[in-house]
Image (spheres, grey):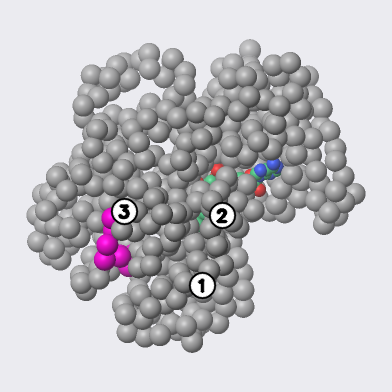
């Protein structure tokens, strides 16, 4: 008889796990609390504008392609992506502008032109970033950190002989101040710690692996926006037989002995398919995979199970506040991805991680997909996705923070662009940590699960399996290997590999 798998949540990791398990022969059903797939990778529409609601930067797209190839399909029939000539345009308070060109040599030369920092320093740094990736990815990204088999092979042995090269004993900032003399270049490379919601002044310099993904392997823009990745994976999942139940929140994982036996699900009132609010018990799941945040999985779905507090009490990664503005003008000075740096980066991280607030001169990320996808905005207009780092939600007054942050961002933009943006905003929406938790169940609205602000953080993320229930698995940003689209896709892969090894003949 065909084995069954229930997946709780259709985020990137849930979709990847669903596709892989279906290809491994399971009858897979995905239960999704929202009425749409993709979790954070979704989109908004208003008055002729389209906005990517969450991620905007696409690295390691080959991990998405891999899912299509596994199914014997051509990914290019489903979605397209391209490399931009400039990955990011950096604006500094002193007027310096750095274009991060896609070719490492062009980028390094631009840094030398704008700051005087020698080209060779940047190239040596990027080579170090690659070395970190080569030394660590097979242990920290591609496999379960919590299985002996990950360590018992030649590659792992080689890494163990070079542990000193992982640069885990100093912070990202400390390391970068060693690499570069110019404070603007240090700031530029410190920013990568935020790619997994961490603080460059605390997080270990092993995180300097991240620039390798963007500058050596490549940063991409999905045609039609990041949401096209969700659409493509959803289509593939359906084609390989995955069934989806939307508007359907799993309420409880029913435990029998040492097994996750079934899911209790609550269909939302607005669902047309089922009686409003009906609770249904779905019996007989052979495998259950939670793509819900691990903290909420324990607290909401498994209240009678012992919570692994050493893991669930880890500090959370940062969150974000995003303003989606339809702007009725075009700004040639801006690129697709823009960073407007703060004057005082240490103060910004102190505000985020110590004071639990949004800094008053926040580094502002401005993403304008309509520069490449003209249909994302009406003619002559631009779709601005304006994001600043925010702390995770511990009960702050978000309404007040929203108003202050909006004012601060508008002042910053006015100073940089020489123009008041506010009268040009013709449509507006907002996302904050509270809404992020409401919409995706991410505990405290953190974007990437627990933070990586200490050298043991990777080992203190939840494993991809339960140590208490033999058939329960975890994937997604709060489980190993962490947040961000590539890592979430990898968590789906690790889960499928574990299931194959542990359950299939
Ligand atoms: C504003 C923003 C910007 C970002 N920028 C980038 C970027 O540029 N590049 C990048 O790589 N990453 C970025 N990220 C991070 C990235 O989006 C996430 O790490 C990733 O998408 C998380 O995927 P996930 O699999 O953990 O699931 P999530 O996206 O968290 O989705 C989980 C899903 O599970 C569902 N669910 C939860 N509980 C239940 C339940 N009990 N029953 C049924 N369904 C349930 C939720 O409704 C949701 O759909 C960004 C995130 C945000 C919010």
Residue shown at the point (20%, 72%) measured from the top left: 94
**Which badge, 2 or 3, comes first in the chain's sequence?**
3
User: What is the quadrant of residue 217 in the picture?
Assistant: top left
Query: Along the line of sight, which residue is nearer the eye, 359 or 65?
Result: 359
- From mark 2 to mark 3, how far is it between C-alphas? 26 Å
SS of the residue at dot 2?
loop
**Which badge, 1 or 2, comes first in the chain's sequence?**
2
Query: Along the line of sight, which residue is nearer the eye, 69 or 93?
Result: 93
**Which badge, 1 or 3, comes first in the chain's sequence?**
3
Task: Where is residue 439? Give x, y as percent.
Answer: 64, 53
Q: Is 284 left or right of 338, judged from the image as shown?
A: right
Task: Where is residue 314? Give x, y as percent.
Answer: 47, 36
The outermost residue toward the right is 275
Residue at which label 3 appears: 191
Query: Which stretch is magenta?
Result: 336-346
Residue shown at the point (80%, 51%) measured from the top left: 268
Image depth: mark 2 or mark 3 in front: 2
Image height check: is 361 above or below 33? below
Q: Within 8 Å: ligand 1 and the Cβ of disc 2?
A: no
Mark on residue 110? none
User: Tag 2: Cα neighbours inside 10 Å, few (<14), some, or many (≥20)?
Assistant: few
Residue at which label 1 appears: 403
- From mark 1 to mark 2, how far is it between C-alphas? 16 Å
Q: Is residue 330 visible?
A: yes
Image height check: is 333 above or below 172? below
Residue at which label 2 appears: 395
Residue shown at the point (50%, 28%) measured from the top left: 310
Q: Is 429 left or right of 158, judged from the image as shown?
A: right
SS of the residue at dot 1?
helix
Task: Verify whether residue 156 appears in magenta.
Answer: no
Q: Evaluate if marks 1 and 3 touch, with contact meaning CB atoms under 8 Å apart.
A: no
Task: Where is residue 155? Give x, y as percent.
Answer: 31, 20
């Amino acid at each position: 008889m065909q084995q069954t798998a229930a997946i709780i949540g259709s985020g990137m990791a849930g979709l990847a796990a669903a596709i892989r398990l279906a290809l491994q022969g399971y009858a897979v059903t995905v239960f999704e609390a929202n009425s749409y797939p993709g979790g954070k990778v979704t989109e908004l529409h208003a008055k002729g504008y389209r906005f990517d609601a969450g991620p905007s930067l696409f690295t390691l797209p080959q991990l998405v392609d891999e899912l299509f190839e596994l199914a014997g399909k051509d990914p290019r029939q489903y979605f397209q992506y391209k490399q931009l000539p400039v990955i990011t345009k950096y604006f500094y308070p002193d007027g310096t502008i750095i274009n991060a060109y896609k070719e490492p040599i062009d980028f390094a030369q631009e840094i030398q032109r704008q700051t005087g920092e020698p080209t060779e320093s940047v190239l040596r740094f990027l080579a170090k970033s690659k070395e970190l990736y080569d030394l660590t990815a097979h242990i920290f990204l591609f496999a379960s950190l919590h299985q002996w088999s990950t360590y018992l092979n030649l590659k792992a042995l080689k890494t163990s002989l070079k542990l000193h090269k992982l640069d885990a004993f100093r912070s990202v900032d400390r390391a970068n101040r060693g690499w570069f003399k110019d404070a603007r270049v240090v700031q530029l490379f410190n920013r990568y710690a935020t790619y997994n919601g961490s603080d460059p002044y605390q997080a270990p310099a092993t995180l300097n692996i991240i620039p390798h993904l963007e500058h050596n392997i490549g940063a991409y823009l999905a045609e039609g926006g990041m949401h096209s990745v969700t659409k493509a994976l959803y289509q593939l999942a359906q084609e390989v037989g995955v069934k989806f139940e939307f508007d359907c929140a799993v309420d409880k994982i029913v435990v029998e002995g040492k097994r996750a036996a079934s899911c209790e699900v609550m269909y939302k009132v607005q669902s047309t398919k089922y009686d409003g609010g009906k609770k249904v018990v779905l019996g007989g799941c052979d495998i259950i995979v939670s793509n819900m945040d691990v903290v909420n999985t324990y607290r909401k779905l498994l209240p009678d199970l012992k919570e692994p507090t050493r893991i669930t009490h880890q500090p959370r990664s940062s969150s974000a506040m995003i303003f989606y503005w339809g702007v009725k003008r075009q700004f040639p000075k801006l690129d697709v991805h823009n960073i407007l740096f703060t004057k005082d980066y240490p103060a910004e991280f102190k505000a985020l991680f110590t004071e639990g607030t949004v800094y008053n001169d926040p580094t502002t990320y401005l993403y304008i997909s309509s520069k490449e996808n003209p249909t994302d905005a009406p003619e002559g207009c631009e779709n601005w996705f304006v994001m600043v780092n925010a702390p995770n939600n511990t009960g702050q007054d978000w309404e007040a923070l929203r108003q202050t942050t909006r004012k601060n961002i508008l002042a910053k933009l006015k100073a940089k662009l020489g123009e008041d943006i506010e009268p040009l905003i013709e449509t507006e929406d907002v996302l904050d940590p509270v809404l992020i938790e409401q919409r995706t169940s991410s505990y405290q609205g953190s974007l990437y699960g627990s933070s990586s602000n200490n050298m043991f953080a990777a080992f203190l993320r939840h494993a991809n399996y339960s140590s208490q229930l033999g058939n329960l698995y975890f994937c997604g940003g709060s489980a190993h290997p962490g947040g961000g689209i590539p890592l979430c896709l990898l968590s789906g892969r690790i889960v499928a590999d574990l299931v194959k090894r542990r359950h299939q003949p």
